[in-house]
Amino acid sequence: MNHQADDQLELLKLLLQEQPTSQNMQKNEQESVKQPSSEVKQEVQNSQRYPHSSSIESRPDPGREQRKGAPEVIFGETKDVAQITAIAQGLLHGSGRAIISRVLPEAIVPIQAAFQAYTVVVHQAARAVIIYQPGYVRQRTGGSVGVISAGTSDVPVAEEAAVIAEEMGCDVTCIYDVGVAGLHRLIEPLRNLLSNGVDAIVVAAGMDGALPSVVAGWVPVPVIGLPTSIGYGLGGKGVAALLSMLQTCAPGLSVVNIDNGVGAGITAALIANRVAQAREHHLQ
């Protein structure tokens, strides 16, 4: 019995019960229209005075991994360094670690400078930065995840999945450049992967996106198809790969969105960690 999950569900139930009824909400809205509060007036004045303010409030969720099993990941591509730094500080304070994905090249040095007192690990291929508090120790769950890429162009997204799965405590084995154009390259590495007791496999592929279906047709473990935005002309940018994976007839294949390495890594790690839990329980 997962008592922690029960507690979270009970808390959610209480929160939902405390939500105001639609009648009360309508009444409150009418009152607020009739008599604006001083806070509302002040907010309006501030917005008029500072119409181009770049201050954006953020609410980091350092307890997400304990609550859900997957950490919060900062999407760095659309944020400036100040925003990334502020959110990362909140996560570091709460959990001792901050994971930043899709970091722009020009942001890496400023991030390193902002966290000189911390351990900053840059994963160039994955375009990810991980910041650890001094003394932080990453837990090992016993889960095992395989990450396969069809071509070398798919490696950055595959590496993103691998980094996330590792941060969630899994042992990760990567096999790259084994796509359907030369399928003989896959046989021996895949055999070794299965012999080592892998719990879930992420398969990243662009172009026609055929490799995840091939792998899912062979292996007895869940496969997460990860379409990448690699391809020519009509159906390029991952569209053909996504549709091909969704249309698969191979059982056991689930699919994430185009280039969603974070989602694929989290899904694989959640599966692997749950299997590892069951394995440990069985041995006790």
Image (cartoon, rainbow, N blue to C red):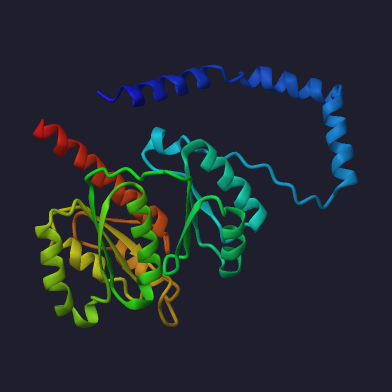
Residue 188 % position (x, y):
11, 72
Judged left or right of residue 261, residue 101 is: right
Q: Nearer the viewer, residue 78 or 26?
A: 78
Q: Is residue 83 above or below residue 250?
A: above
Q: Residue at x 41, y 39 (%)?
A: 65
Q: Residue at x 17, y 78 (%)?
A: 185
Residue 265 lies in quadrant? bottom left
Q: Residue at x 35, y 45 (%)?
A: 138
Residue 6 lies in quadrant? top left
Residue 249 % position (x, y):
21, 61
Quadrant containing the C terminus is: top left
Quadrant containing the N terminus is: top left
Residue 88 % position (x, y):
56, 47
Residue 20 % position (x, y):
61, 19
Judged left or right of residue 26, residue 15 is: left
Q: Is residue 227 above or below residue 276?
A: below
Q: Residue at x 24, y 40 (%)?
A: 274
Instruction: Give the total of numbered labels.
Output: 0
Q: Nearer the viewer, residue 250 or 63?
A: 63
Judged left or right of residue 95, residue 179 is: left
